Image (cartoon, rainbow, N blue to C red):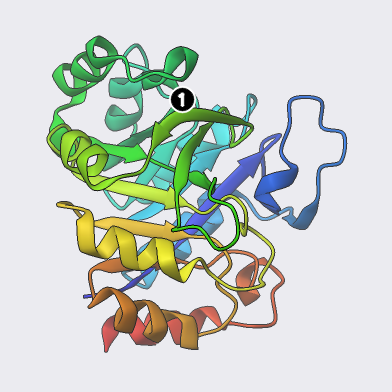
Amino acid sequence: MTKFRPCIDLHDGKVKQIVGSSLNDSGVGLKTNFETDRSAAWFASLYKKDGITGGHVIMLGKGNETAAKAALAAYPGGLQVGGGITADNAKEYIDAGASHVIVTSWIFPEGKLDRNRLESLVNTVGKKHLVLDLSCKRTSAPGEPPRWNIATNRWQTLIDVEITKDTLEDLASSCDEFLVHAADVEGKQQGMDDELIAFLAKNSPVPVTYAGGAKSLEDLQHVKDISGGKIDLTIGSALDLFGGKGVKYEDCVKFNKA
């Protein structure tokens, strides 16, 4: 059944909420909705206290490893971690307390799926500890049937791998869950990609957490309705925890408990 999943997005070692489409290597034009001096571990401890499981810690670039591991230590087994994860460091984060590692760019070098890398990850941490991040951007023109392609490298690089029923079925054999940010609407609080949510609900063989554009508590119920309860939702910039005015964190906790 649909539930709220929390997040801890890290940039330069601090907890932030960023407009996804503004991320780039240079940092020029970066749009930050929220930044706090509260530590990642503080947020992790809050989620632990309230029994909110399955949240994700995302390291947006370098310099976030210490903060991420502090969060994992504060809530062992309660959080997933992603951002710069490879077969070389995946077990390190599982040992640090992550329930799952989240991987995207590393298994799509040069825009193609590297099955050897994917197999190496599965052999390192096991399918049950692996989440594949299929964050994407819409590539269909207005009026065309919806189409999405996976975006890697902090959503900067659009690759040739399209999110299709076959893609989902193929990759699901190697992971426990999918995480999908709709990068076009991420952080904008201007509405979700309903067509993407419905598509994922219909075609994914494994659980999916969707992120991007949620702006109210009603969005949780909406995702439940259009996905038949199959898709979980992350709410970031709209949440009062992150300076938002659209959703109260305590109401999300109540939604999950109900």
Q: Secondary structure at mark 1?
A: helix
* Residue at 40% over, 31% down: 161
Question: Is 202 located above or below residue 60 in the figure?
Answer: below
Question: Is 131 located above or below residue 159 in the figure?
Answer: below
Q: Is residue 53 visible?
A: no
Residue 45 placed where, x, y %? 45, 59
* Residue at 21% over, 13% down: 120
Q: Amino acid at mark 1?
A: Ser
Residue 51 placed where, x, y %? 31, 69
| Residue positioned most to the front | 143
Q: Kindly identify which residue carries mark 1.
A: 105
Residue 88 appears left or right of 245: left
Q: Is residue 175 visible?
A: yes
In the image shown, does 162 or 249 lie closer to the viewer? 162
Question: Is 155 located above or below residue 212 in the figure?
Answer: above
In the image shown, does 258 or 178 lie closer to the viewer? 178
In the image shown, does 149 or 122 lie closer to the viewer? 149
Q: Quadrant of the C terminus?
A: bottom left
* Residue at 19% over, 37% down: 175
* Residue at 22% over, 78% down: 228
Q: Quadrant of the N terminus?
A: bottom left
